[in-house]
Image (cartoon, rainbow, N blue to C red):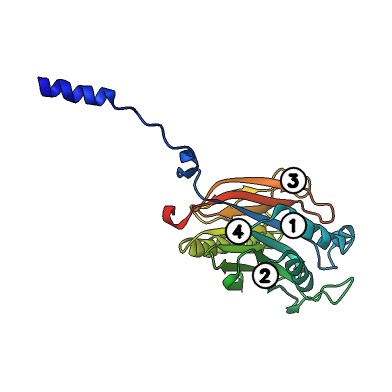
Amino acid sequence: MLKLLLTLAVLFSTPVLAPPAGAAATSPEHAGSPYRLLQMNLCLSGLAGCFGGTEYPKVVDEAIAQIDTIDPHAVTLNEACSGDVERIAAETGYHLRFATVIYNGAPLPCRNPGDRGVFGNAVLTKERIRESAEAAFESQFGSEERRWLCATTTRDVTACVTHLSTRGSDGARAANDGQCAELAQVLAGYAASGPTIFGGDVNRTDSCAAAGMWTLTDAEAEQAPGIQHLYGSAEFRGPRVEVVPATYTDHDFALAHARLLPPGLR
């Protein structure tokens, strides 16, 4: 009995220690470092009807200003021109990969003005790019080839981009659906190997994300809402979207905020 009383006395006299300050910040739901992906459709070909509103080069100036202000970790670009992307990367200090879109069987030179390179999509990253890959989708419709592009950085984060077919006819809708399914397979392959994040104009409201990835959209945008999508693998926690108004292109910009788990918690 005496031994039991002594044990109880020790238990009840031992103070309950509060968790150390800042412990919540290291719990799984709050762990990781901020990660931002900025998606932009810039209407830069010089041929599309939206190009007049870009007041070129103001659209490029606006893109550079937003990247400087937001300081994203990755940027995905649709309807871009290789020369303009090179300027954006040079003035913001980002690394780039560019995927040329084939139009009527050949690269499409950007016009009005010329000497801006060729038309396509791009990924920009703050970290150096270790490797990249791109390919055309098997499903195609019309004169413009649709492609995907993914770039993996030295941080082992993969950022991907695409611009899928519009859905203005039965043939175009079938192509868009096929491209959506192919994109999900591409993203699933990358997500199986490490943190994967995506931005792009998919010309649809339904998601093309791989199983296990979250989906955000620009549904609150004033311009062409709901068709620019942002996807992320499970390593990106607490995702939320912010729509950034754009003045000189026909799509507002879509910004994904998340927290990237450190390797030890993935």
> Would residue 224 appear left or right of 154 to someone viewing this image?
right
Q: Who is closer to the viewer here, 23 or 107?
A: 23
In space, the residues marked 3 and 4 are separated at their CA atoms by 18 Å
C-alpha gap between disc 2 and disc 3: 27 Å
In front of the other: 180 or 82: 82
Q: Classify residue 144 by image quadrant.
A: bottom right
Kindly identify which numbered label has been placed on residue 68: 1
The residue carrying mark 4 is 198
Task: Give the answer, above or below, for where 30 lies relative to 177.
Answer: above
Q: Which residue is found at the position 71% from the left and 66% from the top?
A: 93
For image coordinates 83% across by 61% down, the residue present is: 61
Disc on the earlier residue, 2 or 3: 2
Residue indicated by mark 3 = 221
Q: CA distance from mark 1 to mark 3?
A: 21 Å
Mark with earlier residue (2, 1): 1
In the image, residue 16 lies at what x, y percent?
34, 28
Give the farthest residue toward the left: 1
Mark pair 4, 2: CA separation: 15 Å
